[in-house]
Amino acid sequence: MPPAPVPAAAPTETPLLLEAAGVTVTYNNGHTALRDASFRLEGGTICALVGVNGSGKSTLFKALMGFVKPTSGQVAIDHQPVRAAQRRSWVAYVPQAEEVDWSFPVSVHDVVMMGRYGYMNFLRTPRAADREAVAESLQRVGMWEFRDRQIGELSGGQKKRVFVARALAQRGRIILLDEPFTGVDVKTEEAIIALLRELRSEGRLILVSTHNLGSVPEFCDQVVLINRTVLAYGPTAEVFTSANLTRAFGGSLRHFDLAQSTVQDHDGHHITVLTDDERPLVLGKSGHLEYLGRAGREKLISEREENPDAK
Amino acid sequence: MNTWLTPFHYDYMVTALWTCTLIGGVCGLLSGFITLKGWSLMGDALSHAVVPGVALAYLAGLPFALGAFTSGLLAAGAMALVKMKTPVREDAVIGIVFTSFFALGLLLISLFPSRVDLKSIIFGNILGISAGDVLQVVIVSGLCLLVIALKWRDLLLFCFDPNQARTLGLPVGFLHVLLLLLLSATAVAALQAVGAILVIAVLVTPGATAYLLTDRFGVLLLLGAGIGAVTAFVGAYASYFFDGETGGCIVTLQTLVFLTALVFAPKHGLLAGRRSRNRLCLLKGVTSP
């Protein structure tokens, strides 16, 4: 008898709902990393998780993935506990580069196949559907030619793409990416962002943890701001404001106020900003966002010229 | 009559040869997981921690494997407990627990010297192995082989990326315990072949050697098993002619194989490393130092 077809979660189902309600996580050593964190996100969106180191970002990620059990409160995915979502392979995780043992004797293909375990039988023998999903995912991220490489023999950007391909092969409906742009070249960053946009249009929920503030308004629809709890969440334009960011980052953000600086009028608008972030966050006079490129934002510029003080 | 065939004329030698080969193969197979998971120290600890169990089992007339296994698990449990309840670092915890067990074992053996043979536990006694002990080795090895054959892909994911295993809802805690059980079981079997002190060698060296020779996990496992089995057979065979300790012969041979791989491995060997550096230097137009 032929094996029953593997039921793959169709990516364009009704958008799924991720809810955190009053999540508090206290570790065994008595440290409360997260207190009463609540937010609600729907599929079909790219959401940034923004906060300083030690703000509970990774704890929140762990709670969403079911690695830590909230001391109180709960995480629900489509009104069900995380455990149920795990069993359906709904939650996919793209780890930070430091978390991976790159000298491990596995090939690119092997790693992507690890996204398919949830669809396999007791022995985890890959079937045709699994091989197809792996091939399709590798082609989608442009890594098919590298499928037989040992994972340590790749560049930083290629390594990242392999793990994105694994999340694709898993058919994850919620994809969590931990600092996806660290150690990645600009070309790969743009390719990943383009891919995330495609995944968003398929109804998936993309959650990106990042310290790279400038890139957030460029590609994220929503933001969850956190500092030991959820300070604010919602559309980027509403949440990603100077006031909120100051609350989230406290004194750890450096300000450079042009009005107070030695920059003079005859310098015009020509200022060079150098920063260790690939994309610095630049806010305008009234607190509005300034973007790196003008392309595609001509309307925004003309609106601001007509009404310079509006947000 | 060919002198090279003489060992096969003695029943005890034939038993020793195939038992060693079996044990070497199973330990070599598992060594791939142990080296990649970074559990070498844990393996060393467990192989010493089984000693009091073996002593007690012989004293009580119970199967040695049962005593050894129980003792090993108690040690693993004790380590986990101390690590969880105190801020003492893991290597220190392992150091304290396994030496305590080993000391207790030595004490028990020294109290009843006529009933338990210290030398056979510490150095192994494959040439004098009893039929009952052979049976235990076969059962333990068979179970390990079966478990690895069924679950090696799950164990691979657990070793490589436990977080991914967890997000897919795999029972990570269970896999952890399963690998620990396999480690204890193989340590128990290897005790008979090479003795408590050298168990760790057969549980690490074949895997480390295979690691230098391949970039494929499946190949690594089979290669480790092959190296383990062949070195165990040849080592035991050679020990007949040297009239030396079987364990010593097997482990020395494994070390020689490892050193050969270390120098000559096609990709990860020292020579290959030098070649690729030279090539890089040539490409950049400079001479190698």
Image: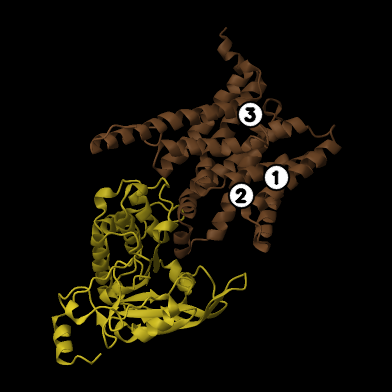
User: Type of residue at label 3?
Assistant: Gly
User: Type of residue at label 1?
Assistant: Ala
- Of the numbered discs 1 and 2, the one sitting upstream in the chain is 1
Residue at 63 percent across and 50 percent down: it is B91
Distance CA(mark 1)–CA(mark 3) = 19 Å
Residue B152's spot in the image, x, y percent?
Answer: 48, 48
Q: What's the chain of the residue with tag 1? A: B
Q: Colour of chain A?
A: yellow
Circle 1 — which element? Answer: helix
User: Type of residue at label 2?
Assistant: Leu
> Which of the chains is brown?
B
Say whether marks 2 and 3 touch (CB < 8 Å): no
Residue B14's spot in the image, x, y percent?
Answer: 62, 23
Count residues near mark 2 (Cα–Cα under 10 Å), then give few for <14, some for 14-19, many for 20+: some
User: Which residue in the structure is indicated by mark 1?
Assistant: B49
Count residues near mark 1 (Cα–Cα under 10 Å), then give few for <14, some for 14-19, many for 20+: many
User: Which residue in the structure is indicated by mark 3?
Assistant: B247
